């Protein structure tokens, strides 16, 4: 039985990313130096996951600020007011994230909204009639190659086109449907280039599927993937959902040509009933989010093992996974020198719990 995680904390064991980013903001290091620090962190995190026997290791889940912002930059969705500053790519990125006041001009940051039911926020991409969606960035390919150079084959992670459109701010005179065709072309190129680079799987995150969906929402989702999936070439696509269940669109998801479907069995109240009620496609892998990616308390092994046994009877191939990215839990309690026994207990078990052939083993790290 294989194991997987949806995403990994990027901050670093000693909050290195925070401190290096702040040094960049104070002009104490260059953007290139910040990139080197980020590469060092990514390498360390991939090695931790590999050393602990995780089969499905993500890449491109790293971000200097926010993954929605990363995707907007990757897809050329940069409002003109930021382009008019004529800054380098790193400075433009942070101008969108934090605003900019300096010799080049004065602009506010993009609007910020809460990332579903977490304490994180995302920066809201802006789409209008002048937006030219196309693949212009290299981030997913660069990070995949970094891991590959370490001997680690990762699964690149992308926020999906449906979630991108649903969370973006679409200005008057433009609609989500107006941008669908351009997104399909850009994502098809992403999948094909990642496959050519050697990726076997690509994870496409669609957390917006757990929200209430109207008829037009389902039609948009189906339109995007009916057009995109035939162009995936030889890469396998994992549709990953989290923060709830996908009851409104579950049957439509099963009917599409996904190679893997990731479902949340922790926050998804109806997820198990959906799997019980509808036959899961034999050729499709179920990535079962059974380990809570947001809660630091010890896992209930008896309940989880019972769930695993039932799922094994429902699906042909089962992969055990976290319920969402591990971004939402503490990296480690090891550096917390001032934590007494009570506060350490309050955090529960801040260690990675991975599943090997249906059994949990405690190993160092965090889950």
Image (tube, helix red, strand yellow):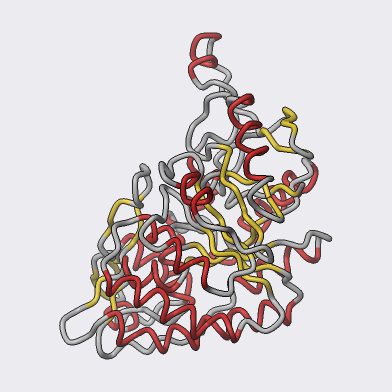
Q: Nearer the viewer, residue 36 or 188?
A: 188
Q: Nearer the viewer, residue 301 or 64?
A: 301
Q: Nearer the viewer, residue 157 or 122?
A: 157
Residue 57, compared with residue 221, is above or below; it is: above
Residue 216 horizontal/vertical position (percent): 27, 75
Looking at the image, which residue sits at the far top? Answer: 341
Point out the image quarter for the C terminus: top right
Q: Residue at x 55, y 9 (%)?
A: 341
Residue 225 horizontal/vertical position (percent): 48, 78
Looking at the image, which residue sits at the far left? Answer: 172
Q: Residue at x 62, y 81 (%)?
A: 232
Left or right relative to 64: residue 122: left
Residue 11, compared with residue 185, is above or below; it is: above
Q: Residue at x 59, y 70 (%)?
A: 258
Q: Quadrant of residue 164?
A: bottom left
Residue 266, compared with residue 346, is above or below; it is: below
Residue 82 horizontal/vertical position (percent): 32, 77
Badge count: 0
Q: Quadrant of residue 69?
A: bottom left
Q: Residue at x 49, y 76 (%)?
A: 74
Residue 25 horizontal/vertical position (percent): 43, 56
Q: Nearer the viewer, residue 202 or 49?
A: 202
């Amino acid at each position: 039985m294989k194991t997987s995680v949806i995403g990994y904390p990027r901050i670093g064991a000693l909050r290195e990313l925070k401190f290096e980013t702040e040094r960049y903001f104070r002009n104490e290091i260059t953007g290139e130096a910040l990139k080197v620090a980020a590469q060092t962190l990514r390498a360390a995190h991939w090695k931790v996951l590999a050393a602990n026997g995780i089969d499905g290791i993500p890449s491109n889940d790293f971000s200097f600020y926010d993954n929605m912002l990363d995707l907007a930059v990757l897809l050329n969705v940069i409002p003109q007011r930021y382009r008019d500053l004529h800054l380098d790519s790193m400075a433009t990125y942070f101008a969108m994230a934090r605003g900019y006041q300096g010799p080049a001009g004065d602009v506010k940051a993009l609007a910020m909204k809460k990332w579903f039911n977490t304490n994180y926020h995302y920066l809201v991409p802006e789409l209008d009639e002048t937006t030219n969606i196309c693949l212009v960035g290299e981030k997913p390919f660069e990070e995949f190659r970094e891991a590959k150079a370490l001997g680690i084959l990762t699964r690149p992670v992308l926020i999906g086109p449906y979630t991108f459109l649903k969370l973006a701010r679409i200005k008057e005179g433009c609609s989500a449907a107006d941008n669908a065709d351009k997104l399909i072309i850009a994502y098809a190129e992403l999948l094909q280039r990642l496959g050519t680079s050697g990726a076997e799987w690509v994870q496409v995150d669609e957390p917006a599927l757990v929200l209430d969906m109207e008829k037009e929402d389902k039609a948009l989702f189906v339109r995007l993937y009916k057009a995109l999936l035939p162009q995936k070439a030889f890469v396998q696509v994992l549709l990953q959902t989290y923060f709830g269940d996908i009851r409104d669109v579950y049957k439509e998801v099963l009917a599409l040509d996904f190679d893997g479907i990731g479902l949340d069995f922790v926050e998804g109240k109806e997820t198990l009933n959906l799997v019980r009620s509808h036959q899961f496609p034999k050729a499709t892998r179920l990535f079962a989010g059974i380990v809570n990616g947001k809660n630091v308390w010890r896992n209930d092994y008896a309940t989880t093992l019972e769930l695993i046994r039932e799922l094994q009877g429902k699906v042909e191939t089962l992969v055990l996974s976290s319920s969402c990215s591990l971004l939402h839990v503490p990296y480690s309690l090891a550096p917390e020198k001032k934590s007494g026994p009570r506060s350490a207990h309050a955090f529960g078990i801040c260690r990675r719990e991975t599943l090997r052939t249906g059994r949990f083993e405690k190993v160092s790290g965090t889950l």
